């Protein structure tokens, strides 16, 4: 087999794989323990290369045992689904294989990234805004905190950070862990990320934020950064940006919005109110690789003020790369990366394909599906919500009839489901209760897919319950 035939065969394999995505009965995963995978796949690279036939086997093995995130029973993570135009954009990105630092090597991609940032800023309301594609929501949060630190202490860019001026950041107690990592990386220290109490719906309480800022000031610290989460990772809660913005303005603190998970709701006319006040923030992390179903990674940090990102970079003493010869700014001058993958092109392909209206509808469908799943939970006498639904996640649990440890039981149900592979759903803990978290992140979901999930879930739970009863009877 030559390379051309290998390419044809690979294309056929991809087509078969995609047909499978449409089959609601196909498993999400053929789960194998690590030692089993070790037996099935030869992971070692040998002295001699493999033949094209062996190479084809490798392709099939990789796809056979990987999780099929495009399958509609993949309800596990905050990203899912298969987006054909974006997939094509991603393939073309690898095909052209260029880097985002200069117009010279990425002319079309530079124009596209600029256009995407402009379009996204038309939703945030940052009239003089800017932005940059980054390597994930965590990194968007890092660059936001970095920009805030540089505004609060501009000299720290050159002299380093004086720990006597103890900087403090404030986030929802249920915010993503990336803020601690960011504070760690920036030398601010993870302990100086202060967790602010949330209400029963998981939304940060503004009065608690103000109290926390005041206490920090009384301790002689320097509050410099607040993040509103839109939406939180487990409960899908949206913090009250408007009220937080007032507080941040009063204390001269940078307000960031972490929309890594739920930021795409800004596209929906019906649900955009969840992010009311977004135009008052200083920066916004938006992950099209989650609710817009763009293949990973596709993340943007938007900033309210043009020039913010350029100021973060201290020495562009690089005449071997930035030549200032084109009538457009090289995007590398505002990124903390040098070589940077082209992530805007797949977004552009998808957005062009579906149009603004198409994406509005896709986001609305995600919310409708979450609402449908919530209804099913509320209507079923053996299911209950662990917390009221806020947006795209439904956190629930099974109530066994027999007296048992409910957390342990639900954990067993989820583990059994995971290993069966018919459907995949995740879990977390809320107020000590294990919550099965169903995420409606795939815009192509239909009610029948949600029905199928609950059929699998309830079947497994009932079987396990029957087994437990049997064990109890036998023990007695
Ligand atoms: C609220 C929130 N912020 C940040 C992140 C991190 O995003 P990424 O996984 O793209 O780094 C996540 C990821 O789930 C998230 O839910």
Image (cartoon, grey):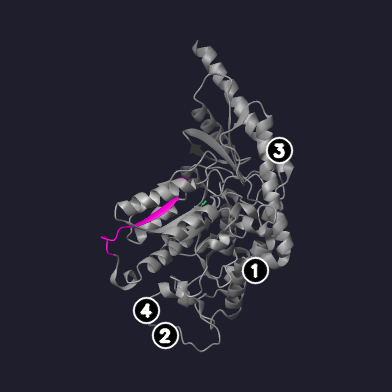
Specify the quadrant of the image occupied by residue 354.
Answer: bottom right
Residue 451, disc: 3
Q: CA distance from mark 1 to mark 2?
A: 30 Å
Q: CA distance from mark 4 to mark 1?
A: 31 Å
Mark 3: secondary structure: helix
Q: Are marks 4 and 1 in contact (CB under 8 Å)?
A: no
Look at 63% across and 50% down and name the residue there.
441
Q: Reply yes or no: does residue 177 show up in magenta.
A: no
Judging by the rendered image, the residue that carries numbered circle 2 is: 320
Mark 4: secondary structure: loop
Mark 1 Cα-neighbour bin, 10 Å: few <14, some 14–19, many ≥20: many
Which callout, 1 or 2, points at the residue further toward the start of the chain? 2
- The residues colored magenta run 162-174
Judging by the rendered image, the residue that carries numbered circle 4 is: 315
Give above or below for 319 relative to 172: below
Is the residue at mark 2 in contact range of ligand 1, meaning its CB lies under 8 Å from it?
A: no
Mark 2: secondary structure: loop
Which callout, 4 or 1, points at the residue further toward the start of the chain? 4
Q: Are marks 3 and 2 in contact (CB under 8 Å)?
A: no
* Picture coordinates of residue 181, whole percent (x, y): 39, 55
* Picture coordinates of residue 3, whole percent (x, y): 61, 70
């Amino acid at each position: 087999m030559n390379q051309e035939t290998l390419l044809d065969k690979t294309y056929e394999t991809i087509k078969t794989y995609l047909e499978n995505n449409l089959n609601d009965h196909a498993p999400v995963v053929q789960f194998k323990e690590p030692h089993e995978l070790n037996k099935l796949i030869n992971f070692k690279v040998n002295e001699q290369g493999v033949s094209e036939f062996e190479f084809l086997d490798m392709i099939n093995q990789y796809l056979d045992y990987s999780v099929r995130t495009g399958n509609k029973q993949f309800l596990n993570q905050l990203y899912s689904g298969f987006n054909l135009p974006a997939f094509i954009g991603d393939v073309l990105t690898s095909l052209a294989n260029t880097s985002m630092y200069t117009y010279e090597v990425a002319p079309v991609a530079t124009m596209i990234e600029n256009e995407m940032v402009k379009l996204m800023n038309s939703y945030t309301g940052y009239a003089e805004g800017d932005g940059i594609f980054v390597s994930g929501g965590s990194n968007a949060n890092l660059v936001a905190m970095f920009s805030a630190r540089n505004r609060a202490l501009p000299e720290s860019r050159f002299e380093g950070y004086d720990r006597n001026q103890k900087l403090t950041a404030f986030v929802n107690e249920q915010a993503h862990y990336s803020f601690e990592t960011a504070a760690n990386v920036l030398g601010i220290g993870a302990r100086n990320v202060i967790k602010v109490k949330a209400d029963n719906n998981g939304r940060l309480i503004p009065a608690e934020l103000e109290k926390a800022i005041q206490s920090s000031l009384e301790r002689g610290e320097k509050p410099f950064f607040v993040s509103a989460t839109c939406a939180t990772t487990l409960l899908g809660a949206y913090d009250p940006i408007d009220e937080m913005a007032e507080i941040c303005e009063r204390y001269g603190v940078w307000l960031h919005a972490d929309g890594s998970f739920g930021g795409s709701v800004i596209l929906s006319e019906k649900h955009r109110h969840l992010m009311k006040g977004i135009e008052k923030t200083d920066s916004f992390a938006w992950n099209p690789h989650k609710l817009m179903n763009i293949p990973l990674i596709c993340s943007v940090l938007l900033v309210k003020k043009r020039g913010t990102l350029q100021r973060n970079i201290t020495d562009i003493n690089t005449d071997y790369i930035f030549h200032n010869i084109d009538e457009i700014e090289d995007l590398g001058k505002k990124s903390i990366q040098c070589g940077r993958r082209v992530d805007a092109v797949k977004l552009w392909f998808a957005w062009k394909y579906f149009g603004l209206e198409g994406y509005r509808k896709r986001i609305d469908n995600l919310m409708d599906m979450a609402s449908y799943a919530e209804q099913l939970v509320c209507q079923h006498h053996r299911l209950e919500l662990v917390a009221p639904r806020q947006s795209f996640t439904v956190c629930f649990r099974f109530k066994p009839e027999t007296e048992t440890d409910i957390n342990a039981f639900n954990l067993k149900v989820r583990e059994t489901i995971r290993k069966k592979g018919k459907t995949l759903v995740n879990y977390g803990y809320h107020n000590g209760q294990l919550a099965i978290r169903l995420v409606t992140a795939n815009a192509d979901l239909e009610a029948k897919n949600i029905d199928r999930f609950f059929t699998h879930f309830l079947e497994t739970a009932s079987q396990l319950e029957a087994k437990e009863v049997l064990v109890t009877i036998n023990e007695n």
